Image: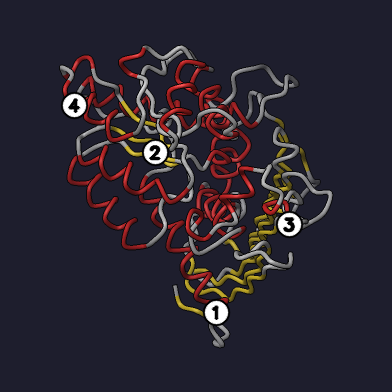
Amino acid sequence: MVGGGRDAFIGAVHRKAMALDGQIELVAGALSSSPEKARASGRDLGLADERNHRDWQSMLADELKRPPEERIDFVSIVTPNHVHFPVAEAFAEAGFHVVCDKPLVHTRAQAEALVATVKRQGTVFGVTYNYTGYPMVRQAREMVRSGQLGELRKVVVEYNQGWLASHVEGSGSNKQADWRTDPARSGAAGAIGDIGSHAENLVASVTGLEIESLCADLSALVPGRMLDDDGSLLLRFNGGARGVLIASQINTGLENDLRLRVSGALGTLEWRQERPSELLHLPHDGPKRILTRGSPWLCESAQRASRLPAGHPEGFIEAFANIYGGVVADIRARLAGIAADPLAADYPRVEDGARGVRFIERTVASSASEAKWTAW
């Protein structure tokens, strides 16, 4: 693991998800940009001294010196955004499999370079758009792709939070707010990159629709903030469907309100992250129904993504674990020299991350433009 040391929120989430199914062991790390903090964080987690590194460069060098059978199988990158590209590029170029948090990198050029490296080296590369790991999201994907909604017409996705409703980055006590609102570390976008990229990926994963053009309005509504904290987009998809995407982190009192509605000629599906075990299906020719996680009539992909019987809550960490499970299945298949079961190796790829970077860039460009629509 690179990043995710003391006081880091997402690194701990990744480690809990990795441990959930007993298939992954954390054996090496460079867990902070501060060498002293990196080493202390590794000791906290019980890493052996010889694999508890001051920086990621020494970790990579050490792994390359080891016999192939003793090397790490993959590296997980859970740093602030500006560190993603150099670490991912270096490890992928060296032939290591990679899992990287989102958004993938800062620029489209970096994304294309990374896609090319992964293709050339033939490595596994997963991007932790964790909401695609929820069982009912996979059920929604199957229902859309199998034609149960008919021709798609309208998609509305909202991701609303309230944790940045005030200038918390100025307090000096909120590490997450500090780097996520800093253009040097977060990139050219704030909320649209942090949570808007999740919203875009959720739409693409469930519907398979491709954006043709978009019209975006990004704002920094909290005085003194350098990056957007609120965004509203109109979307036009290839094939004629229309969409709305909202990503906002200044909705006071809201927590992690991600919701998706997909409407087609034959009906509508609705899913909310804060009620993740339910998928609402509203067919045009019958009563609405609520599908629930763990039920025997769900598709195989949704059933495989569940660990507990219906009625026993599963959520955020389990969704992360499903992404890691997909990566592990792909790596194991490659080690065995066989084709991976697509239902097992179900995870967002480097190409999905690259598309997310393009989405961020086109959204920022649209918001800065006087033109009504910006081509994809």
The residue carrying pointer 1 sits among few (fewer than 14), some (14 to 19) or many (20 or more) residues within 10 Å by Cα, namely few
Q: Quadrant of the N terminus?
A: top left
Circle 2 is placed at which residue position? 126
Say whether residue 117 is left or right of residue 142. Answer: left
Circle 1 is placed at which residue position? 368
Kind of residue at disc 4 = Leu
Circle 3 is placed at which residue position? 167
Which of the two labelled residues, at mark 1 and mark 3, occupies the earlier sequence position?
3
347 shown above or below 66: below
Task: Report the number of discs.
Answer: 4
The residue located at (52%, 46%) in the rendering is 146
Circle 4 is placed at which residue position? 64
Asked if the residue at tag 2 contacts the one at tag 3, i.e. Cβ–Cβ closer than 8 Å, the answer is no
The residue located at (56%, 87%) in the rendering is 370
Q: Where in the figure is residue 344, as x and y percent of width and height?
A: 42, 28
Q: Where in the figure is residue 284, as x and y percent of width and height?
A: 74, 55
